[in-house]
Image (tube, rainbow, N blue to C red):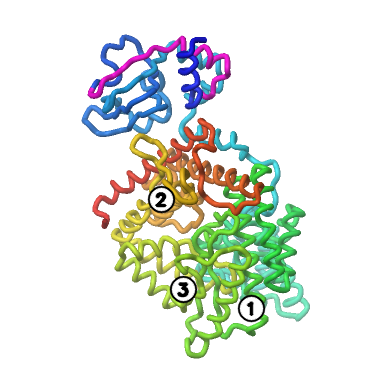
Amino acid sequence: MDVELVEIRDFLAEYAPFSLLDAAALNALPRRLAVRYLRRGSAFPPVNENQRCLYAVRQGAIELRTDDGRLTGMLSEGDIFDQDCCAAAEHAIATERSVGTAIEDTLLYLLPCETLQALRRENPALDDYFVRSVAERLRHGRHALGNGPSERTSLMTLTVSDFVRRAPVGAESSLPICEAARIMSREGVSALLIVDSGALCGIVTDRDLRTRCLAQHLAPNEPLARIMSTEVACIGPESAAFEALMLMTRKGIHHLPVVDASGIHGLVSATDLLRWQSTDTVFLVGLIGKSPDVESLMRASAELPELQLQMQGHGATPGQVGQAVASVNDAITCRLIELALQELGPAPVAFTWLACGSQGRHEQTVHSDQDNALILDDAFDDALHGHYFSALAERVNDGLDACGYRYCPGKVMASNPLWRQPQRAWIAIFRGWIGHTDAKAAMLAANFLDLRTVYGDTALLMPLHEAIKQAYSKSEVFLANMVANALKNKPPLGFFRNFTLIADGEHADSFDIKRGGLIPVTDIARILALSNGQARIGTLARLREAAGTPVLSAESAHELEEAFEYFGNLRLQHQAEQIRRGQAPDNYLSPAALTSLERSNLKEAFAVVERMQKILSQRYPDRPA
C-alpha cells in the first residue's frame, strides 16, 4: 500500500465509526475515498459535488447553521458529517437541515453514500453505529467497558425498592384489633402500618398481636393504638438493601417501613432480605457492627477499595457501586455515633444525623469528602445542650476523617455550628435561601436538597422537606439561581468538540469527569425535580420520574441517564486501575488513556449535557449573572 494511503488509513482508524472496522476493511477504505479541499469561506457540503457523501474532516474547521442562521454545530479534525447518507438518531433532535461554511482552510475525505451502505452491510459493528441513537450508543459503549448487566446480585447491589413487592397495607390507630387481624389475614401480611391523617404513626406485627393482645388478655375490640409500636424506624426506597438489613439487626426488629418525602411506599422484612444475603456483605456489615473503636472501623473502611474493585469487576453499575459505598459510609457513621453515645451518654434531646451531597444521593465512590449535618429537636437549648452535640459531631466527623472520608473543604459538616441546628432553624434557613436567594444560597441549597437521614429520629426531617416543597414551588427566582449555579460546571469540550484539559500541575493533560460530567447531570436532575414538584433524591430516580413530563422529554431523559452512566463507568474503570496500582482513586481522566471509540462516546455524552444546559439557560433567560 502506498505511504499516502497508509497515512489516511491510520488517521481514520483513530476515529469512530471507522475505528470499528476490522483490519481488512480499514486497509481497503482509503481507495474508496475522494479528497476535497475547501478554502476558508467556502460552502459546505461542496456545491460542485454531484453525489451524496459522508464527509470526514481531516484538517480545518466547519461551522454548521440552519437556513435561518442558527448555529447547530462545529466540525473539526476527526468529525464526520453523515446528514446526506443517514437519518441517524443523533440528527432527530433537529429536523432542519444544516449547511455550513469552512471557517478555516479545510481538507475533507468523502465516502459516497452507496459505498457507506455497502460497508454497513459487510460490517455489523459499523451498521450498529449508524442505526443506534445517542443513548443506545452510550449504553453499548458502557457494556464495551466491561460494565454491562451483572449476573451477580447481592444486598450491596440491590435497593430497598427492589424488595417492595406490593402497595402498603395500613389502617388507622382507632381500628379495633380484631378488624386489623382480619385485614392481615386477608392480605397475607405479617405487619400492618398504622397511618393517621396520611402520616405513619406506628406499626403492628404478628408478634404484637400475640404478646400485647392475647398474652395480656386485651379485649379484641380495643383500638390498635393500645398495642402498636410508635417508635418506628424507616428507610428510603433508594437505600441499599443491606443497609435495611443492618438497621433491622441493630434495632432488633423484623419489619421496616419504606418511606421518603413523597410518602409511604411499602414494607420490607428481614426474611425477604436474608434470602438474598451474600457472604461479602455479611462480612463487612458484621465487621462494622462489631467494631469496638475507631481503629477497628478504620480497618473495616480499608476494605472499601477492594469491595469497589470486586463489584466493578463483576459488572456492577455505577449506581450499584454508589449504593454499596454510601451504605458502608452510613454503617460507619452509625457505629461512630453509637460509640460517641456510649462515651457521652444519652442525647438530651432527639436528633437526626443527615447525609447530603453524593452520600445523600447514594452516589459515592471510595473515600469521598464528608457532607453531613444535624437536625435537633426544637426543645434544644444551646446553653444546656450545645456542648453535648458539639462533642458528638466532632467525634463523628473526626472518626469519618480517620476512616478515609476527608473533611469537607467547604465545612459542610455537623461539627460546623451552622449545620447543627434545631428543626425550626433549618426550616427558616431554607425559606431564607428560597425567598431571598442569591448565588451563594443557590450553591448551598443544591447540596442540602439531597438530605437523607442516616441515624436518629426520621420524623425531624419530614417537616423540613414539606417546608422546602411549599417554598420553592412559589419561587421562579430560586430556580433561576439554581440554573445559574448549575451552569458553572461545564463539560470539558472546546469550541470544536475537542477536550479542554488541565494545563499544568499534578493533573495536567486530564479533565475532571466528576465536575465536568457527573455533577452537571446531577444538577440538571435536581432542577428538573424541583420544577416538577418531585421528592426523589437520586440522580437517576429524578431523571426517570421527570421523563415524559412537561419539563423533560422521554428521549432527553434517556440520553441524560445513559450519559450519566457512561461517565460513572469511565470513572469506575479509571479508579479500578488506580486501586490495582496502589494509588488513591481520583476523578481525573486522560483522553490519551481512552480508545478512539471511548473518546467519541465521551464527546457525545458531553454533548448531551451541553444541549440540556442550553435548554435550561433558554428556559430561564433572565437568570442572575
Mark 2 residue type: Ile
Q: Which mark is residue 433?
A: none
Q: Which of 173 and 92 is in front in this view?
A: 92
Left or right: where 47 falls relative to 182:
left
Sooner in the amino-acid sequence: mark 1 or mark 3: 1
Mark 3 lies on a secondary structure that is: helix
Depicted 173 relative to depicted 551: above or below: below
Q: Where is residue 185 in the image (x, y as percent from the top left)?
A: 71, 61
Q: Residue 524 carries which label?
A: 2
Q: Report whether residue 186 is seen.
A: no
Q: Where is residue 542 in the image (x, y as percent from the top left)?
A: 47, 51
Mark nearest the camera among 2 and 1 is 1
Residue at x-position 70% and y-position 44%:
152
Q: Nearer the viewer, residue 543 or 44?
A: 44
Mark 1 residue type: Ala
| Marks 2 & 3, CB-CB < 8 Å contact | no
Residue at x-position 54% and y-position 81%:
389
The quarter of the displayed image where residue 106 is located: top left
Q: Please give the residue where the numbered disc 1 appears in the rendered image.
A: 340
The magenta stretch spans residue 435: no
Q: Please give the residue where the numbered disc 3 appears in the rendered image.
A: 419
Quadrant location of the C terminus in the rendered image: bottom left
Residue at x-position 70% and y-position 66%:
288
Sooner in the amino-acid sequence: mark 2 or mark 1: 1
The magenta stretch spans residue 36: yes
The magenta segment is 19-41
Mark 3 residue type: Trp
